[in-house]
C-alpha cells in the first residue's frame, strides 16, 4: 500500500561533484558538508565553499562536535589512503596522516576524547588522537579483523568503536586496548551504512543498511540484533537517523529515500531522488531537515514531515 505521504518531491538538486556524493554530514545551520571527487564541499542552496584535498576522491567526511574541524578521508585506489584535518572556518589544512595501503573509505570522530577513526579498503581500522585545533594526529590503535573494505563506522557514547563493511559483519572494538569485543554477522550482504541516535532509554544502539535490502537495528554493546526492517526492492546504500532515534532515513539503488519508524512498520514517507541512486544521507540536529547525496554528484534537501 502506498503511504499517505508517498512520492514527495525533493528540493531542486545542486550539482556538486562529477562523480557520486560519497558521504554527507549536516551542519547546525541547515547546510551540509559532502565528499566526492576532488574533495569536500559545503552545500546549501548552492555550493558555498570547497575544501581541496590531496585525494583524487574523498570517501568520507566527519565534523568535530563544535564544527570547528572537518575530517576528510580518501586516497588512491590500491595504493594509499588516509585522513586530512581542516579548520572548518578558514579551510586551512591543519594536519594529515596516511597508513592505509588502499583508499580510506569511512571516518568517525569522538570529540570528547579527541579521537578520529578511519576505515580502509585494505580492511584495516586506524585510530588517531588529534591535538589542539587539529594540528597534530597521533596514531593510537590499529584494529585488524575485517576481511574486506571497512565502509562505515561510528563511536558509541562510552568510546567503543563500531565498524562494518564489505564482509557483512558488524564489529565492536575497545579502542583503548585494541581488543575485538564482539563480531555480529546477521547481514547476508555488504553493510554500506551505519547510523547512531546516541543514548535512547539508557541503551546505546545503532542501525545498519545493507545490500541484502534490509535495515537491522542493534544493541552492539551486548551483541544483540533487535529487529529487521524489510520492504526495500533494491540494495540499500545510505542511512541516517533523526537524533531522538524515532525515525530512520534509508536510500537505495532504486532511487528512493524512505522515512521509516525505527520500531518497525510501513514507511512514513517516500521520496524519488533526482540523480539515480541515493548514495549518502544526513539529518539535522533538530530532525527537521535532511540532505541526500546522489550518484550523479548532486545534492538535494528534504524538509522532514
Image: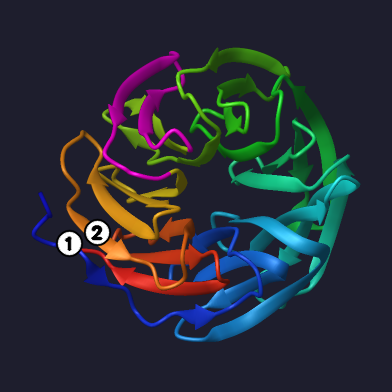
Is 286 above or below relative to 110? below
- Is residue 216 part of the magenta span, yes or no? yes
**Of label 1 and label 2, which has the lower sequence position?**
1
Give the CA separation, mark 1 to mark 2.
5 Å
Residue name at image x 76 percent, y 56 percent: 134
Report whether 225 appears left or right of 293: left
Quadrant of the drawing holding the C terminus = bottom left
Report the span colored magenta: 211-234
Examine the image and state in which quarter residue 290 appears.
Answer: bottom left
Report whether 54 appears left or right of 274: right
Q: Secondary structure at mark 2?
A: strand
Which residue is at the front of the view, 211 or 131? 211
Q: What's the mark number on residue 6?
A: 1
Q: Secondary structure at mark 1?
A: loop
Q: Which residue is mark 2?
A: 270
Expressed as whole percent of the image width and height from the top left, the position of residue 291 reads 42, 66
Residue name at image x 64 percent, y 64 percent: 35
Expressed as whole percent of the image width and height from the top left, the position of residue 183 reads 56, 15
Examine the image and state in which quarter residue 9 appears.
Answer: bottom left
Is 247 above or below relative to 33? above
Amino acid at each position: 500500500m502506498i503511504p499517505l505521504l508517498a512520492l514527495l518531491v525533493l528540493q531542486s538538486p545542486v550539482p556538486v561533484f562529477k562523480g557520486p556524493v560519497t558521504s554527507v554530514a549536516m551542519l547546525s545551520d541547515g547546510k551540509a558538508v559532502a565528499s566526492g571527487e576532488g574533495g569536500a564541499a559545503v552545500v546549501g542552496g548552492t555550493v558555498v565553499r570547497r575544501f581541496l584535498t590531496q585525494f583524487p576522491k574523498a570517501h568520507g567526511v566527519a565534523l568535530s562536535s563544535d564544527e570547528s574541524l572537518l575530517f576528510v578521508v580518501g586516497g588512491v585506489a590500491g595504493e594509499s589512503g588516509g585522513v586530512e584535518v581542516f579548520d572548518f572556518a578558514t579551510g586551512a589544512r591543519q594536519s594529515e596522516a596516511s597508513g592505509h595501503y588502499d583508499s580510506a573509505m569511512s571516518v568517525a570522530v569522538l570529540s570528547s576524547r579527541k579521537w578520529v577513526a578511519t576505515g580502509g579498503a585494505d580492511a584495516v581500522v586506524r585510530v588517531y588522537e588529534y591535538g589542539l585545533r587539529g594540528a597534530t594526529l597521533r596514531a593510537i590503535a590499529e584494529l585488524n579483523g575485517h576481511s574486506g573494505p571497512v565502509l562505515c563506522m561510528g563511536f558509541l557514547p562510552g568510546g567503543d568503536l563500531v565498524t562494518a563493511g564489505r564482509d557483512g559483519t558488524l564489529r565492536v572494538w575497545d579502542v583503548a586496548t585494541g581488543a575485538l569485543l564482539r563480531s555480529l554477522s546477521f547481514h547476508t550482504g555488504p553493510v554500506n551504512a551505519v547510523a547512531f541516535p546516541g543514548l535512547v532509554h539508557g541503551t546505546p544502539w545503532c542501525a545498519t543498511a545493507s545490500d541484502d535490502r534490509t535495515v537491522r537495528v542493534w544493541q552492539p554493546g551486548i551483541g544483540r540484533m533487535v529487529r529487521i526492517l524489510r520492504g526495500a526492492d533494491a540494495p540499500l546504500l545510505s542511512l541516517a537517523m533523526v537524533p531522538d532515534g524515532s525515525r530512520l532515513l534509508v536510500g537505495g539503488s532504486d532511487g528512493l529515500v524512505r522515512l521509516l519508524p525505527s520500531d518497525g512498520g510501513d514507511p512514513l514517507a517516500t521520496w524519488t531522488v533526482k540523480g539515480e541512486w541515493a548514495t549518502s544521507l544526513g539529518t539535522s540536529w533538530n530532525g527537521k531537515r535532511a540532505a541526500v547525496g546522489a550518484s550523479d554528484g548532486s545534492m538535494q534537501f528534504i524538509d522532514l514531515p
